[in-house]
Image: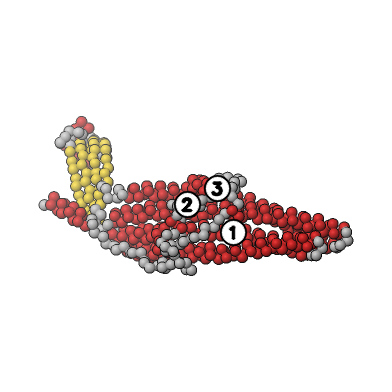
Amino acid sequence: MKRFNLYTILLLALVWSGCSVSKDLALPEGLAPKMFRNAVPQDSSSVGDMPLKSFINDLTVQNLIDTALAKNYDMQIALKNIDAAEVLFTQSKLGNIPELKLQVTASSSRPSDNSLNGLSLNQFTGSTHIEDYSANLGLFWEADIWGKIRNQKAGALASFLQTAEARKAVQTRLVANVAQGYYNLLMLDAQLEIARKNLKLNDSTLRIINLQFDAGQVTSLAIQQAQAQQLVAAQLVPRLEQNVALQENALSVLIGTLPKTINRASRLDKMSIPANLNAGFPSAMLSRRPDIKSAELALDVANAKVGVAKASLYPSLVITASGGVNSFKASNWFNVPASLFGLVSGGITQPIFQRGQLKANLELAKIDREKSVIQFRQSVLNAVGEVSDELTKVEKLKDQYSIAEKRAQTLQEASRNASLLFKSGMANYLEVITAQGNLLQSELELATIKAEQLNAVVGLYRSLGGGWN
């Protein structure tokens, strides 16, 4: 009868092991719009689908990105997080395997001659001490009746996959930062070249004004104003040289190397802006973005925690067994089968006094799950907003560059005409200084807008989920 009852308990454990006491909360649907703001997708393709080296074809930028992916410390930490999560996931897969322990013990005790144990021992065995030798294997197994262990495995798997998505997110951000840092460096190079060219132009103008002053054609005020204009351009040179060094240092740290000079094989005016930047559909973007996938996996983790917390409210079935050899004398320790022994037991444990705490844990798990849903909604909203921002930048910066380019060309012609008219006496020095100052500002602004265009294109690529493939 006892054996029948034990078999009955084991059978019920196997039947109930497929039961689940919690219901997973599904991801909210319909969060993404049909299309991005002010964007009409040509087809389902997107620049976010492009491989990294197909989208960024500049070899210098590619080399910098390769170095960053290998040496950047944030990237290395992300990889270590994956290793740690993999170890935890591997460990979680062993959750439902019986725990088996080997135990070998030997003991000797001498009770008091005046104690009951001592008197009994001397009377029946004629000895004053007791020896005990034992070697056994013990088994401990908890039946996964309510799906607690299964939920623990599911949570560990989702956490492991989350770290992989986190690595992708770090990589996409790193790729964008490296490319944008390099483009900013090209912008500073172009502006430094513009400042030095303008400084030489001011030197030429100042020499002419000095000659006119010697001839009595202008006053000292003309020389002072020309010198002031020259100092404006001169002051730009060390400032831009400082910014170049700082940008090189920042880019060096980003790629995981000591601050150094960054080799540039490109010029800003030679960098091309892609003409066709199709964003595709928002729904496809959600499946590419690592942060969206991570938020989705966070809900899986939260669902698993709710399942574990709820299963803790219900009875747990534990099966234990042990067997081995036992003897009061070392000489008979392995005298088989006389020294053999075995024990099998099963028990059901129902929490009573801890039930209030377990219910509180369940409610907290449910609240965390609801927070995961809210965070998923927020991540989708942020992603759609980022893409819309970058699309607007790409479109409007294109118009700004076109206008700034025409303005720079007009001011270049105006500066040349002012210089010719000034040399022939048909324009005064103020007109020349004004034209040169306007030209300097317009060319600096044109370089800034070109760099912003390049950065916006990279930003669009990242926001669409590109950069990790």
Give residue 60's mark: 3
Q: In the drawing, does residue 436 fall left or right of residue 313?
A: right
Return the x and y of residue 253 as percentages of the image width and height: 56, 49
Callout 3, which amino acid?
Answer: Thr
Callout 1, which amino acid?
Answer: Lys
Question: Observer-nearest residue: 221 or 173?
Answer: 221
Mark 1: secondary structure: helix
Choose the circle earlier in sequence order: 3 or 2.
2
Q: CA distance from mark 1 to mark 3?
A: 18 Å
Give residue 54's mark: 2
Per the image, the residue denoted by label 1 is 450
Compared to residue 453, the image places residue 63 above or below, namely above
Question: Observer-nearest residue: 158 or 249?
Answer: 249
Q: CA distance from mark 3 to mark 2?
A: 14 Å
Choose the circle earlier in sequence order: 2 or 1.
2
Confirm or deny contact between disc 3 and disc 2 (CB under 8 A). no
Return the x and y of residue 86 as percentages of the image width and height: 37, 48
Return the x and y of residue 385 as percentages of the image width and height: 48, 65
Q: Nearer the viewer, mark 3 or mark 2?
A: 2
Residue drawn at x 77%, y 60% is: 420
Residue drawn at x 27%, y 40% is: 103
Residue 418 occupies quadrant: bottom right
Q: In the drawing, does residue 229 fall left or right of residue 266?
A: right
Residue drawn at x 55%, y 66% is: 396
The crowd level at tag 3 (other Cα within 10 Å; few <14, some 14-19, many 20+) is: some
Choose the circle earlier in sequence order: 1 or 3.
3
Callout 2, which amino acid?
Answer: Ser
